[in-house]
Image (cartoon, rainbow, N blue to C red):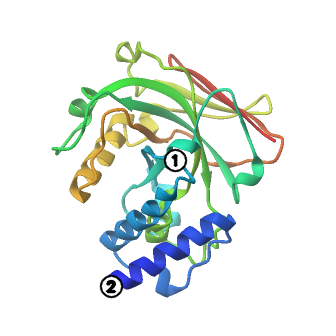
Amino acid sequence: MSPEEKTVAARFYREIFDKRGPLSPSLSHRPSDLQDAYDVQQLWAASFNDGSRGALAGYKIALTTPVMQKLLGFDQPCIGPIFEKSVHQAPANLAFSDCGRPGLECEIAVRLSGDLSDGPYDRESVAEAVDDCMAAIEVVDDLNADYEAIDAYTLIASGAWNGGCILSDSARNWRSLDLRDVAGTLIINGVEVETGRGADVMGHPFEALAFVANTLAELGRPLRSGMIVMTGSVVGTKWAKRGDEVTVRMSGLGEASASFR
């Protein structure tokens, strides 16, 4: 894509975000390689310098499982930005209408105490920069996507669909836990829907964190101290309905809850 085409594509994805979809881009708005996709994402993210979503607060990882990669025809995870106004402390009350189509994911979130800018990193070295871990709900928003008209590059260009994060209190004792064995349960309206473990995300949540750190360092947009990183869902995405009461419980890390009014 030319610089002009990237600018036009970023403007298109911002307009779709503001309207909450439907996301059905033409070929001219779809990046054809990874670099173009992240270039468009950067321009899209910069459009929120208008203050509408607050400052950049961190990043999320998506497509961590083979089934999701197959769905979008990709062979690796991808990342997207998280903005300050979409980060909530549990318990949270959220407006269902703020999303196009909200999905619910069950994750371990981390807050960084140091920069991750030099790389390459592995799961042991990124651990040194983690201040604390939290149970988290990620609200993903696919903006009513037409899945016949999108691919992983579209997902990246449109910000990787972070609609919000709901965080538990910080678990300062996380270093005493094997995060691979942490059980995460998604509960909707009092019913335990699905349970997974930390190892279900790339073998260890910090493998996901290392992927995010290395990718962003290569892009020249490194993780900084104080940022939040969502390390990927241990369960499949479940689509929310208006009125749902949602809880994510992570063994040893606490729980986060939200209601959709």
Image quarter hosting the C terminus? top right
| Residue 204 appears anywhere in the view | no
Q: Does label 2 or label 1 sit earlier along the sequence?
A: 2
Tell me the number on the disc at residue 160: none
Amino acid type, callout 1: Gly
Q: Which mark is residue 2?
A: 2
**Label 2 residue SS:** loop
Q: Nearer the viewer, residue 15 or 258?
A: 15
Question: Residue 129 is drawn in which quadrant?
Answer: top left
Q: Nearer the viewer, mark 2 or mark 1?
A: 1
Q: From the top left corner, tell me how far across and down residue 96 is, in percent.
A: 76, 49
- Residue for point 30% across, 47% down: 211
The residue sitting at 68% across, 52% down in the picture is 102
Q: Is residue 54 left or right of residue 64?
A: right
- Quadrant for residue 190, please give it: top right
Q: Amino acid at mark 2?
A: Ser
Tell me the distance, in whole angstroms, between the alpha carbons under discs 2 and 1. Answer: 29 Å
Mark 1 highlights which residue? 54
SS type, badge 1: loop
Instruction: Count numbered badges in the picture.
Output: 2
> Dot 2 surroundings within 10 Å: few (below 14), some, or many (20 or more)?
few
73 up-or-down from 88: above or below: below
Q: Can you give x and y, in whole percent of width and height, for residue 107 in the image?
A: 52, 36
Q: Is residue 198 left or right of residue 196?
A: left
The residue depicted at 34 percent of the width and 35 percent of the height is 206
